[in-house]
Amino acid sequence: MTKGTNRIWLSPPDVREPERKMLLAALDSGWVAPTGPDVFAFEAELADRCGTAHAVAVSSGTAALHLGLLLAGVGPGDDVLVPTLTFVASANAPTYCGARPIFIDSDPATWNISPQLLADELDQRRRERRLPAAVVTVDLYGQCADYDAILPMCEELEVPVIEDAAEAVGATWRDRPAGSFGRFGVLSFNGNKVITTSGGGALLTDDDDAAARARSLATQAREPTVHFEHSEVGFNYRLSNLLAAFGRGQLMSLDERIERRREIRGRYEDALAGVPGLRLAPEDPRGTSNAWLTCITLDPAEAPCTPTDVRRHLEGHDIESRPVWKPMHAQPVHAGAPARLDGTADRLFATGLCLPSSSGMSDGDLDRVLAALRESLSPG
Ligand SMILES: *Cc1c(COP(=O)(O)O)cnc(C)c1O
């Protein structure tokens, strides 16, 4: 990738001195591979931060989703309920287990899985005696789903919840950390997320046995024998020690990173107040978002232009922005999957736009984005 020197990206990595030092220290220590002390320390620090008994560091958020679903018992022929408005990994992971995703539309109040539509789907399936094997919730753009509503209904039916908190590390709901709500929680440390290991993820759980099983499955299900005995099919999903060291450095400044992302969100809010038809993605007062990405919607009946116009204008100033996730029910790869829809996700896709939000963005760059935005959104 050739980077334009002046280009402002949506959410590039924000790399600071501590993680650089910790990466080099791990390298110099000789613990280059496979696992090592930084992996175990990173896991302990993540579990502590996310309020779970265990964190298992793996090579991606997608790998963590796969392991979480497997350990929740999802298998061939099963159905898994998934919000339609998400990144494709949430919908692909069930298919890795031979299961099928069933898509549920969004709640306009949070953009997350609609508790009402989820209740309707669960109710119908209870009556028809075909409960799903799991529910995947997604904490979209850094805001937790409505766990007040979701957890009791899943608990009552004993359907396990897998919380895809890939975008939401450090966010909270009722002061409880994102990633701690389901039987399993999933974090991603992909390069565009709030903290990164360049590529990586973690599976969070309170279940001692499941954590041990996850570590085993992530290491080719290798049993402790000199000749590598295997009784089941595993995966090569473990995070490397070098990347864990880098992640530990990133995690140390998680609060500052979130503070900066929320500050950026606030600057957008102030600068765009009064643009007709423009709204920021709503924030539910029961939680605190990590503001991973600031998203806006433009109501076509009132707004001076479309999200595509804004995106093209920003592109002309070498500024990256992106549409809101294209809903999974509209993706060719998942076109055959059943879906319970009310039009909310389609509307958010048609009217939404994600704006540059990196915690590493300078005030000067932010001013540049704000000026270009105001230019594109000024009437006439
Ligand atoms: C980024 C992301 C993932 C996947 O994480 P990777 O680490 O890139 O595999 C999963 N779900 C959501 C909602 C994401 O945004």
Image: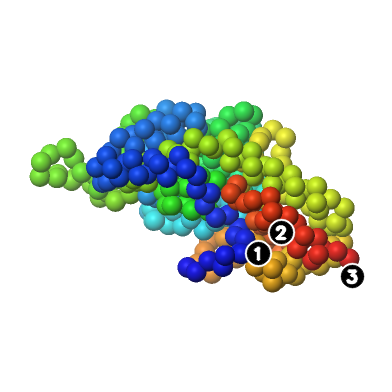
Residue 147 screen position, x and y as percent = 61, 35
The residue tagged 2 is: 369
3 vs 2, front mark:
2
Q: Where 130 falls versus 206 (above or below)?
A: below
10 Å crowding of disc 1: few (<14), some (14-19), many (20+): many
Q: Nearer the viewer, mark 3 or mark 1?
A: 1
The residue located at (66%, 36%) in the rendering is 288
What residue do we see at 53% from left, 66% from top? 3
Q: In the rendered view, would you say 261 is above or below 301?
A: above
Q: Nearer the viewer, residue 186 or 375?
A: 375
- Per the image, the residue denoted by label 1 is 319
Image coordinates of residue 201 in percent, x first then y, are: 43, 46
Pointer 3 or 2: first along the chain: 2
- The residue tagged 3 is 380
Gap between marks 2 and 1 measured at Cα: 7 Å
Mark 3 near mark 2, Cβ–Cβ under 8 Å? no
Q: Tag 2: Cα neighbours inside 10 Å, few (<14), some, or many (≥20)?
A: many
* Badge 3 element: loop
Q: Amino acid at mark 2?
A: Val
Whether residue 4 can be seen here: yes
What is the image's colouring? Answer: rainbow
Q: Is residue 346 visible?
A: no
Q: Residue at x 56, y 32 (%)?
A: 177
Residue drawn at x 72%, y 49% is: 281
**Drawn side of residue 20 relative to residue 367, left or right:** left
The amino acid type found where label 1 is placed reads Ile
Q: Secondary structure at mark 2?
A: helix
Labels 3 and 1 touching (C-beta < 8 A): no
